[in-house]
Amino acid sequence: MHDLGAPISTSQTKYLELLARYYVRKGEHIAAARMLLILAERQCSNSEEAPALDKRYEYLRDAVLQAKSAGIAADLSKNPVDSSTVDLLEGKLVVLRFQIQIKEELELMVARLENIPSSSELPNVPFPRDNILANAETAKAAKDKAKELSLNLKSITQLYNDYAVPFDLWEVCLEMLSFANYSGDADSKIVREVWARLLDQALTKGGVAEACSVVKRVGSKLDPADGACLPLDIICLHLEKAAVIKFRRRISW
């Protein structure tokens, strides 16, 4: 019996795919879902063996469909099955979406940093060499992390702590916190801090207008009933302060 925690080669993958299709034809939907889950989560030791994240997503999506088919078949036979399997697989699918999103964000970051002009093209920038070195280091780190995300699936905790937070990906951080159902005083403090960092990031980039645009975009992805992840009072106060500062600077001119 193959150790499910060990890397699975490409040739072994073909047999698992055949086995999954066999279970589907036999109507053994839960068994098919398990095979598809193994394929989605298979460990890889190098990038050549690793399936693309989109392929892993396809496996997981099909696993969810098979688990749901098992539930439908059970309802028809009046022999209920545990719905936790569907919940588990759907949760894994959401986390994989986050992984794909973070990987794409990191790749965009690398492309942006690598296209920054050289020091000779930035005569008015103080300490241009320091900025270029910092950008190069950040680009390398982001590229390495994006490569890691291509190899194997990560947990939501790993995605948050090891990939999103270090690269200031505050928007996806909020989405993950919302998915994880953060609540309570301690958790609310974390959410408020992430919102503050996201708003400051947007204000630096494009002022109050950009920050409002970010709130609209991110807020639409969160549950409006979830006051913990969408603290409107804190958000509005942050924007009001930024607007006041902008107004005072304008009249001082």
Image (cartoon, rainbow, N blue to C red):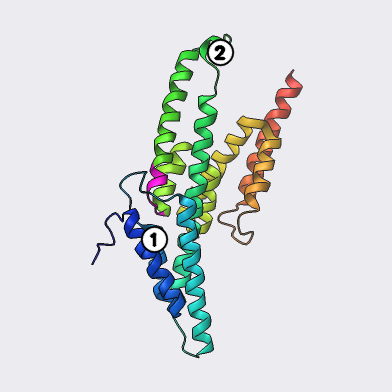
**Dot 1 corresponds to which residue?**
39
Q: Amino acid at mark 2?
A: Val
| Position of residue 82 measured from the top left corner of the image (x, y, whole percent) | 44, 79
The answer to whether 20 is drawn above or below residue 43 in the figure is: below
- For label 1, the SS is helix
Q: Answer whether residue 152 is magenta in the image.
A: yes
- The residue at the point 40 percent across, 40 percent down is 147
Q: Is residue 183 visible?
A: no
Range of the magenta residues?
148-155
Please give left or right for residue 208 compared with residue 124 in the image.
right
Mark 2 vs mark 1, foreground winner is 1
Q: Earlier in the sequence, mark 2 or mark 1?
A: 1
Whole-number angstrom distance, CA of label 2 to CA of label 1: 50 Å
**Dot 2 corresponds to which residue?**
125
* Depth check, front residue: 33 or 107: 33
Q: Answer whether residue 42 is magenta in the image.
A: no
| Position of residue 233 measured from the top left corner of the image (x, y, whole percent) | 64, 49
Instruction: Assign the C terminus to one quadrant of the image.
Output: top right
- The residue at the point 54 percent across, 22 percent down is 116
Callout 1 environment at 10 Å: few (<14), some (14 to 19), or many (20+)?
A: many
Instruction: Assign the N terminus to one quadrant of the image.
Output: bottom left
Q: Exactly how many numbered labels are in the figure?
A: 2
- For label 2, the SS is loop
The answer to whether 119 is drawn above or below residue 52 in the figure is: above
Q: Is residue 103 visible?
A: yes
Q: Which mark is residue 127?
A: none
The answer to whether 252 is drawn above or below residue 195 in the figure is: above
